[in-house]
Image (cartoon, rainbow, N blue to C red):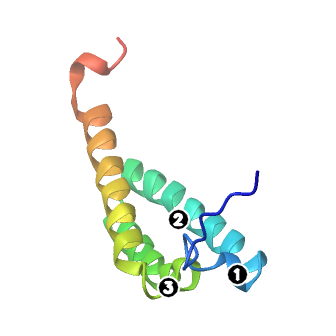
Amino acid sequence: MINKIRFTEPAFGGENRGRARPELGSALLAVLLLVEVASSLAGAGSVFFACIVLAWLVLPAVVGFRNVLDAGCLYMFVSLGIVVVVHVAVHVPVLQLP
């Protein structure tokens, strides 16, 4: 049976424009998250901030302008999670090995 539900807009804004740009943008966002983890562990706050600014500049190309605030909020929640997890891992003495 054919699915009769039709979507009026793409889920992330880039699927109908070709596959290369959204995949490249998603890979760049994943790399920026990894750099955020590394800079958070190293204590480099300016690099962490630069990654967030770059992510906000890349998001419109990945998700489109209509969904940029939703994707940005999700990215910021993940960034906040990185900060919390790294802070707990570094500063809580119970988790440190003897």
In contact (CB < 8 Å): disc 3 and disc 1: no
Residue at 47% in and 79% down = 54
Q: Secondary structure at mark 1?
A: helix
Asked if marks 2 and 3 touch (Cβ < 8 Å), the reply is no
Q: Does residue 92 sit above or below 76 in this rendering?
A: above
Q: Which mark is residue 70?
A: none
Number of numbered markers? 3
Q: Where residue 48 sits: x, y (%)? A: 38, 66
Give the number of the disc on residue 16.
1
Give how far across and how far down residue 49 sits, in percent.
Answer: 34, 72
- Residue at 37 percent across and 54 percent down: it is 78
Left or right relative to 66: residue 27: right
> Mark 2 against mark 3, which lies toward the viewer?
3
The answer to which of marks 1 and 2 sits earlier in the sequence is 1
**Residue flagged by tag 2: what amino acid is it?**
Leu
Camera sees residue 31: yes
The residue beneath circle 2 is 32
Q: Secondary structure at mark 3?
A: helix
Task: Locate residue 80: give its quadrant.
Answer: bottom left
Report the front residue among 64 and 39.
64
Structural distance between the alpha carbons of marks 1 and 2:
25 Å
Q: Residue furthest front?
A: 1
User: Image quadrant of residue 46?
Assistant: bottom left
Q: In the picture shown, does residue 31 fall above or below 95?
A: below
Q: Looking at the image, which residue is at 75% across and 57% down?
A: 2
Residue kind at label 1, given as amino acid type: Asn
Under mark 3, the amino acid is Pro
Q: Is residue 76 left or right of residue 33?
A: left
Front residue of this view, candidates 5 and 8 = 5
Please give the residue where the numbered disc 3 appears in the rendered image: 60
